[in-house]
Image: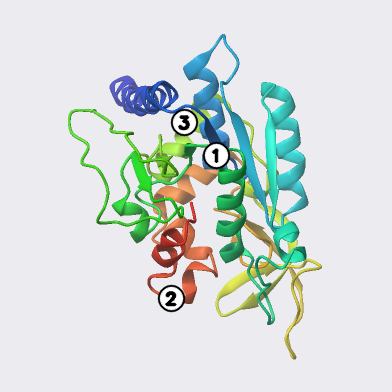
Amino acid sequence: MHNMTQKHNDHLDQLESEAIFIFREAVEQFENPVLLFSGGKDSITLVHLAHKAFYPAKIPFSLLHIDTGHNFPETLDFRDELVKKYGVDLEVGYVQDLIDRGVVQEEKGINPSRNGLQSATLLEKLSQKKYDAAFGGGRRDEEKARAKERFFSHRDEFGQWDPKNQRPEVWNLFNGKKAPGESFRVFPISNWTETDVWEYIQRENIDLPSLYFAHERSVVERNGTLLAESPYNTLLPGESYEKRRIRYRTLGCVTITGAIESDADTIDKVIEEVRSSKVTERGTRADDARSEVAMEERKKQGYF
């Protein structure tokens, strides 16, 4: 048993070292990086890793949160606490601001997703603040389009991702060379699985929003997805909210983030559940379910 635990720790140590190496390498190569912070477990893990990478110095870049206006209140409270804890600067881009200015149009319909509008908000912020690299918590195991990512993911001057124009990465050499206006997304935990993230969170005692653990919540089941009661969701004729014991595997807009029924109210139980799950964590996202290539299309428009 001791050997298994040691092996396990070695695996997490290796992933941690790789992520820290990527952070340091990117800070060396880019002039003005920023960390994309969604308030989910992956971006929280990134902040922890960045803290470790540069300790005892302060994290040498800001966090950027693209606020859809459809957040879980718990996510925003947690974000503000975390910023205080690490003493980092927080930059917020508001989707509502672009809607008000007529730059983007809100989706119509029953549970409108603002996910597509995040890309325009993000690109505007990156360009305003002249960020040339953005750290993200994307992982290859999450979703088909993300499996094609490199650690350093090249974007053209329109913030768009072309899966065919990505640099080869051999022997840990990362090429951040870019033309003016181009930028990179950098994914330090690209090689981690969902289980790795949870086991690392457990080992490092990282705090998470309570949404990740089993709790009672009023939800409606729609097309096999459990959606939370919120001012942004509209019930269809014949639908009603009911109390269920649920938790979230991934956090996004209240309108499109599906919950799962669960009794996993501790980190040990969550890890057990994740290990035995057959559905990827983004399998509960109604926005990814819209089409087979939904994520790839959004990435080409500049999404994380």
Q: Which residue is mark 1?
A: 43
Other residues around mark 2 within 10 Å, as few (<14) / some (14–19) / many (≥20) = few
Q: In the picture provided, is 154 more to the left or to the right than 79? A: left
Tell me if residue 70 can be seen. Answer: no
Q: Quadrant of residue 10?
A: top left
Q: Is 75 placed above or below 16 here?
A: below
Image location of residue 145, percent across then percent down: 35, 59
The kind of residue on which mark 1 rests is Ser
Q: Quadrant of residue 118?
A: bottom right
* Residue that sits furthest to the top in the current view: 56
Task: Name the residue at 67% across, 67% down.
Answer: 255
Inter-mark Cα distance, 2 to 3: 32 Å
The kind of residue on which mark 3 rests is Tyr
Looking at this view, is 18 or 63 the one in front? 63
Task: Name the residue at 64% across, 44% down.
Answer: 65
Other residues around mark 1 within 10 Å, as few (<14) / some (14–19) / many (≥20) = many
Image location of residue 259, percent across then percent down: 61, 62
Q: In the picture provided, is 10 more to the left or to the right than 20? A: left
Looking at this view, is 58 or 126 the one in front? 126
Q: Which mark is residue 200?
A: 3
